[in-house]
Amino acid sequence: MSYTEIQLETGELEEVWRERALSLLKEEPDKVQGLILQLRELGEKENPNLKLPTENGFYLKFLRGGLMDPETSMEIIRNYYKLKMNNPQYFKSCSSIEELAKSTYPSQIQAMLPFRDGHGRRIYVFRPGKWNPDKIPFNDIFCASYMLCEMIAREERTQIAGITAIVDAQGFGFKQMRAIGLENGKNMASFFNIAFPVWLRQSHVLNAPRVFHMLFNMMHPFLNDTVKEEVVFHSGDITSTLKEYFRLDLLPKDLGGTGSIVDNSNNVEQLRSMKEYMSNLGNFGYEK
């Protein structure tokens, strides 16, 4: 699959995407509506205190996250809403994009690049070494990343192809390590692992100091085998190893490529256009 600029995508899925959905997710168009109905019925029986959206798109998104299996998809829905219920501190700032636009996103710690990789995946950039815990609390780091994931989870092509993560750990030290801690690290792992309906297909870790390896080892037990097996550590001449996975002219200069530097301003503008959508997300979940 060729690289695709996100803004040029249309609403209608091309044949290559329907074929990819069948190959990756076992998605057969003539069975989708029946599976949506099954998942909807499971949701209705789940818990009288669990309020779910009514739109078919919600159920299709989670079905794709669960390989079109209603039982597995229902488990992801449970984990998604339990994470929100048990950790409201992570999501408090999500109701105000303007606050995050001033306090968090300008640090360019996280971004979704404007191109898909050669497998059709969105490319998520996370640079924890640029995070100053004295100025930005971990909860806002989590929230800013979560909002970017909600943004791309609305894209059918991303529901099918998933995400590739590039984690540039340069500058990551004990200050960031202490600010994360075991519980937050566990929840970070759970989010991409069992509590969000978009597939994390591969992770590339660049410039990792010893303390970052300590963080990774702490999170490792909470990752499933699929995620563990698709983590690639790059060291030394990272450009020479990254080009085995990415076209370098589409990777930012500050990540070993030759393209424009990381800039999440377009992400912020898209999130601004999603204020109503993000606010509406708070109307669903487990009611205490």
Image (cartoon, grey):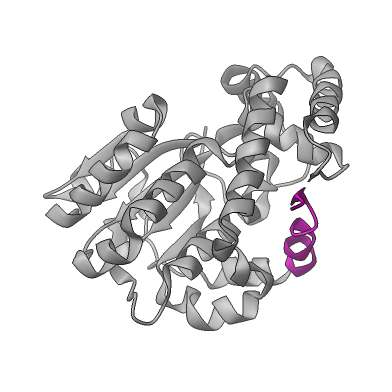
Q: Residue 90 is drawn in which quadrant?
A: bottom right
**Rendered residue at 46%/70% (across/down):** 263
Residue 134 placed where, x, y %?
A: 33, 80
Picture residue at 26% right of the left edge, 56% below the top: 256
- Viewer-proximal residue, 144 or 11? 144
Residue 130 placement: quadrant: bottom left
Decide which of 146, 184 is in the foreground and name it. 184
Image coords of residue 245 (percent x, y): 33, 38
Tell me the residue at 56%/45% (across/down): 4
Q: Is residue 132 above or below residue 219?
A: below
State which quadrant residue 7 falls in.
Answer: bottom right
Taking the image as shown, residue 28 lies to the left or right of residue 124, namely right
Q: Is residue 214 magenta?
A: no
Q: Is residue 72 visible?
A: yes
Q: Position of residue 283 (x, y in %)?
A: 80, 57
Residue 135 x, y percent position in the rendering: 38, 82
> What are the residue bounds of the magenta stretch?
274-288
Return the residue nearer the eye: 109 or 258: 109
